[in-house]
Structure formats: C-alpha cells, structure tokens
Amino acid sequence: SRALAAWTRWEPPLQSLLLGTDETPGLEPDEMAEVQGGVALGDPVIAREASGRLWLCWTDLAGDGERILLRSFDPASGEWGELIQVNDGQEASPFGVLAYNAQIAVAGNRLLIVWVAGAPPRGRLMARSFSPGGGLSGASVVSEGRALVRPALTGGRIPAVAWEEEIDGRSAVRVRALDADGAGQGSIIDLSGMPGRDCRRPALALSPDGRLLAYAFDAAGGGGHDVFTGLRSLGPGGIGPAQHRTQVTRHPASDIAPALAFSHDGALLWIGWHSNRAEGDTWDIPRWYRLAAMNTGTGELVAPPTEPAGKDLTMQETIQGWEFVRLVACPDGKVVVIGRPSHNWNMQFYHGREWSPIYRFPRESWGGRGKLAAAVLDDDGALWVTRRDLNANVLQRIGGVVGGEELEPVLVPFDDGEGRPLANIDPRLAFPPERAGEAPAEGEEDTRPELQFYFGDIHAHTWMSDGMGDVDEYFLRSRDVFRDDFAALTDHDLFVGQRVLNSQYEEHKRAVEQHHEDGRFVTLYAQEWTTGRPPRGWGHINLYGTTPDHPLMDHSDPRWDTQAKLMAACRQHGMIAAPHHIGWTGHQWEEHDPEVVRFLEICSVHGVFEKMGNEPIPHRGGIAGMFVQDGLAMGKKFGLAGGSDQHGLIWHHRICWKRNAYRGGLVGVLAPELTREAIFDALRHRRTFATTGVKMRMGFKVNGALMGSEITCEGPPVLEADLIAMQDIRWVDVVRGNEDVLRYGGESLHTFFSFTDEGCPVGRETWYYLRVIFESGDMAWSSPIWVTRRG
C-alpha cells in the first residue's frame, strides 16, 4: 500500500460529469485525497468531531492478515494524524486474521470503533474506543454468534450497535447499547422479530437531540424483500421500547438495503433504499433508489411527489441503475443521496420540491469500486465523502452543498399497496428422468437407476467484484424467482483494481452455506480466478468445491500465480475448474489438467464459444485456436456447461444478444438426487449440458452411454436423442469429430430420433455431441460422448 497522498485536484471536475444537463451546480468538488492506495481495501467510513476533525476507518489486507486502520484528518490545517491499528492481537482463523465491517461514531470525547472478527462460521462483534489523550481502550466482545456480519453504529450519549446474525437458521437483526468505551450495556434486543424471514442489512440513525434511535432492515420472502423501520427511545436505562414500527414497502419485488438520516429538527426520518420493482407486481433487472420519510411524531409515511430526476431504467451501456444508498440530511432542508450505479458513484439532492441533476464522481472506469460510500457535513456546508475507488480509498470535499434558501421538503402520503404475490416468478419444470444403458425388452421391468434433470447458473458476479447486487440476493433470486435447482457465485479474485478480501470471501461462504438445503436448493462454493490473456496470463477460470476449507485463490499470490499452481491447489482441495469465454480471453491448453478441468463453459452473456464464427449467436472477441472445438481436436476431454456470467446489467452493456442477461447461460446436469454431493458428482463426471437460458430435457446417449462417457463398440454406434423443451426446436445437429453429420428438423416441443452412424471411423477415437437451435434463437449443447469403434 502506498503512503497517503497530498490533496490533489481531479480532472475533469465534477461539473463536467453531470448526466443530462449542462448546468453548473455551484459546487466545489476540487479537493480529493488518497487515504490509502492498494487493491485489497475495505469500504472506508467517516465520523466528525465537534471540533471539525475527521476520522476515517477501513480494513486493509496485509499478507494474510486484515487490519482495521484508523486515521484522523484536520481540515483546518490539512494535517493527517498517525495511522492507528485498531485490531491488534486478534485471534487468527485458518485464513489469517479476519477483521472487517468496521464502523465508527463519536461518543462524547471518544471515538467508538466496532468491527467483526473471528473464525468462520462464528463471528465476534468487537468494540473499543479511542481518545487522543488516552489512546485505545481495551477491546470488548459485544456479541458472538453464527454468521454475525454488517454492524451499524450510532454515537451520542447512549451509543448503540445493530448487527445481523443467524438464529435458528434465519438471519435476524439485533441491537445493543454500548458504554463510552464500547462495552455492551444491557441485554441484546431482537429488532427484526420475524423468525420466519431472513432479515438483513441493518441501518441506524440517532435523532438530533439524542433521544431517539431509528432502525431499519430488509426482510426476504416470496421472491422479494421488504423494508421495515421503527424508532426506540434512548434514556438512562438504555434502549427503550419500540415506537412506530412500520413496514415501509409492500411491493412484491425486492426493496433492499435501507439507509437512514434524521432531518435537522428531528421531525422527519428519511429512509432510502434500492428496488428492482417494475410494472404492476413484477420485478426486473434494472434497479434504482427510492426515497421516503417517516413523521417521527405520528409515524406517518410520506415521500416526494415525483420520481428522482434522471431516473432511467432503460440504460444499456456500462453505467446502469443505482443501488446501496447513503443519506445525509442538511440544515437547509436538503437531503443528499449517494450510491453506486453499476460502475462509479452517483450523488443527487432533493430540496423543497426539486430534484437536482445526477452528479457523478470521478473516475470513470469498469469495476474497481466498493459497496458503500460514507459522508458527513461540516459547519461550512461542505460534504466530505469517502469511498472505495479505483486502486485506492479516497476522501473528497465538495463545497457548496448547503446554502441558499432554506426549504421545507414537499412530501405526500406514501402508500405501497397491499403486498400481493410476485407475478413473474418462473415455473418449476420437471422432465422425465434419464436412465443409462440399454432399455429392457418389452414387458420386462426397467431396473436401471433414474437420473433427474437439474438446472443452475454457476457463473455470476455481485458488488464484491464488478457486478451489482448482494450475495444473498443472488441465491434467493436463483431459488425463489428463477426456481433453479442449484447455483454458484463466482466473484473475481482480483480484477480491475479490487481484490476480494479474505473476510469478504468468508462472508460469501457463509451465504453459500445458509442458502443450501438438500432436496430443495443446492449451493456450491466458488470463485473466479481472473488473469490476463495468453501469453500474459491464463485467461479466466471458475473454481468449484463442496466444502469451505479452501482460501480465496488470488492470481497475484505466488501460491496460485500460474495455471499449473492453480490446478495443483484444486487437486489438494478436491475442487474442479471451468475455463470460460475462452475465444475472448484465451486458455492455456498446454497446462490443461483433465482431472481438474472437467467441463468448459461454452455460452454466457459474452456469446457462444463453440467455434470461430459461431451462429446464430455470435461470440465476443475471436482468438484463433481458443474455442471448444479446438480443444476437442487437440484430444482434450471435457464436458460442456453454460453460465450467465451476469453482472446485473440488461443486455450486458450491449455485449449480450438478449436483454435478460441473468439467463445468458445455464448448465443442466443428470443426477440421482438434489444434493450437493450428487450435483458436484454430475459436474465432475461430465453428465452436463449447456443452454443459453432454456430449461429442457437433453436426452442424448450413444449405445446407451450417457453424456460425458467414453465407450468402445464393435459396429457402427447408435445415437439416441430425446429432447423436450417449453419452446419449439428448429434444428438438432449431430456433431461427430467437429463435423456436422446430421441435421434433424425439430418437432415442436418434443423431438425424438435415433441415428446409426455408418460413417464412424474404425480404429480410432472420435466424439459426438448434439447442438440444438430453437426457433427463438436460443441454443443448447450436450456434453460429448467419446467413442472408439473396433470394427
């Protein structure tokens, strides 16, 4: 990590980055500092003392250990304080010291710091205080529990901390009062109180007079999420009873990740969140923030009468949507909304009855951002914003935010309907099972074991790397909206200036375990190992496993910095690997390990990589020798799979051939039951097929052998295809040795045929697979079956 930099002027200034307007906003966004450089940093948070001194806190990965770092900045003198490590002497986990989710708040003449530490699957909520004269207090354990994450903190006379914790298999939101040194006071209170729903992402706010604690969280159910909020009194006895507990949202889509801020007179509690709601009772991929407020005296919900200016759910380029907001309420009645679109950061104001334009922070680039920005106002009306940006955590001063006429916000009653079911949930499909081997004679009992058809997306990205959305959100959407049978999430190890922290990967693993339920929905542990294109690197490779006892394999780490080292590590941990979009980013065939690379991803939002010039779906890029058929021609043996590789963008910024990039690719497997072991065994043994988002019955056998098999035969092989889909099939191509040897016309929803291949070569091995083309333009492929004909 680099040392702190001096203040620097950024070009272009913020004014030139307005969307949809040429107005000059009267802001002064020309002062920015690099708080710390590097790729392995957590989101920074900020607090301000009454004296004006700013404090910043963040996680830094040094070697295998994570540090909670604290540093002050004096705007009056421009001087930085010494760097302070908060989590000294913490117990190490199998993956090094884990210290993350840091939050800070001012409590009297002390600064409170809370963070999460401990070895998974349990976590400890730690707290301690700092004062310039007395240094750090001793560390206290506020709470300890399973899957304890995401603390939120308030300061003042009676500090309080809320967090998310797994209780009886469900996530709950809890809160506890603290003393000025961070020690827990009184009992732990369950804020959510909904044992049948997963409640996550707590937010807290302290009223200006310090007498009210506001809280909010989101609760999952029915394929969506709802936002809840409420108030609790604060007094000598600590946290008091609930007041005005309210369900803010009732739309069946996902309203998620609330943020809170009190107006300066305490009369309003502003509530912000992001939503993927669409027309009627439906959801869609684009998401945008929403803003409402609660009257703290009556509990009435109100909201601006108009949508935010510049809201656009039709964007198709790199920048789309707006999520994970933070709010700042100003003394002139303005409320500031800061959050992240798909890339970079946005800011907008609501003042009186007017929305400002959307302001974008520098710099423009793909990825490399954190999840949450943080901001405070100073006495001069300037906004100080800190955020995880490209290769650095930064602090920026934006002058002129407060000023001009003081206006009461114009608000109207907020009514979110009656809470009807989500209308566009996919149906759960079940197809006739498959059996291996020759069918019994007519009248005889069929005793062959049945294999079921199961479907999943095992390639996707969230905020942890360069995508949108949260980790649990991905699994819930796969399970409850798309009705998939299994899923895996593959955020990049290190990509475009941002590395997944060890603690973040452990949080990812906890979500994998929490959403897994044999017989209902299977999850796999996964990541993407992301290097440059050959010869600079080895392309992009997804890794899959069934247990959490493996580290994040960072391609910049000498332990995993070559494909050969990666393959050895996968063998050690019982994992398998899948290169993908190889015609675009390449693959080192020379280091291809067939015992680890059990399948290749043939299709995704980046197109189809069966062969150069693929049709009807094209491919991104085009590196000669780097397609599926090239590998097969070299004698490599692997199954085929599809994966969306979605990043939360419609049309995947105009790269994907379809709008719904969530369904850019699927893998189907043949397995005897829906368990983690059975799904993984099917992937390992190449009983797989790929589709561009269609769920179907891909029945394909050669002499009774299933996809992925290697067989010998004495005469010409007999191929059987039995295909069922919910959309019409146009063509079924039989491919032998990369040559199309039969094109069979589709027969509506069910196509069945057999084919005896007299042209199968004698005395050498060849391979067969099916290519399916639908009337819609979608495609599907079976895994190959390798055949050696002896006579």
Image: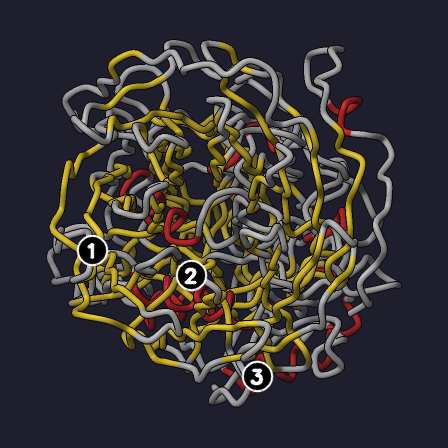
Label 3, secondary structure: give it: helix
Say which mark, if any, is on residue 175. none
Specify whether 295 is left or right of 769. left
**Looking at this view, is 462 or 334 the one in front?**
334
Say which mark, if any, is on residue 571. 3
The local crowd at label 1, few if under 14, some if 14 to 19, many if 20 or more residues have their Cα within 10 Å, is few
For the residues carrying marks 3 and 2, which lies nearer the camera in this image?
2
Classify the position of the N terminus by image quarter.
bottom right
Residue 428 falls in which quadrant of the image? top left
**Looking at this view, is 478 or 764 the one in front?**
478
Specify whether 204 is left or right of 686. left
Q: Amino acid at mark 3?
A: Arg
At 23% from the left and 67% from the top, the residue drawn is 449
At 18% from the left and 70% from the top, the residue drawn is 186
- Establish if 281 lies above or below 507: above
- Establish if 644 lies above or below 117: above
Q: Which residue is mark 1?
A: 235
Q: Which residue is mark 2?
A: 107
Residue contact at pointers 3 and 2, CB within 8 angstroms = no
Q: Amino acid at mark 1?
A: Gly
**Looking at this view, is 558 or 579 the one in front?**
558
Q: Amino acid at mark 2?
A: Ala
Residue 663 is situated, as x and y percent measured from the top left of the image, at 47, 37
Q: CA distance from mark 3 to mark 2?
A: 51 Å
Label 2, secondary structure: give it: strand
Residue 600 is situated, as x and y percent measured from the top left of the image, at 60, 58
Residue 258 is situated, as x and y percent measured from the top left of the image, at 37, 40
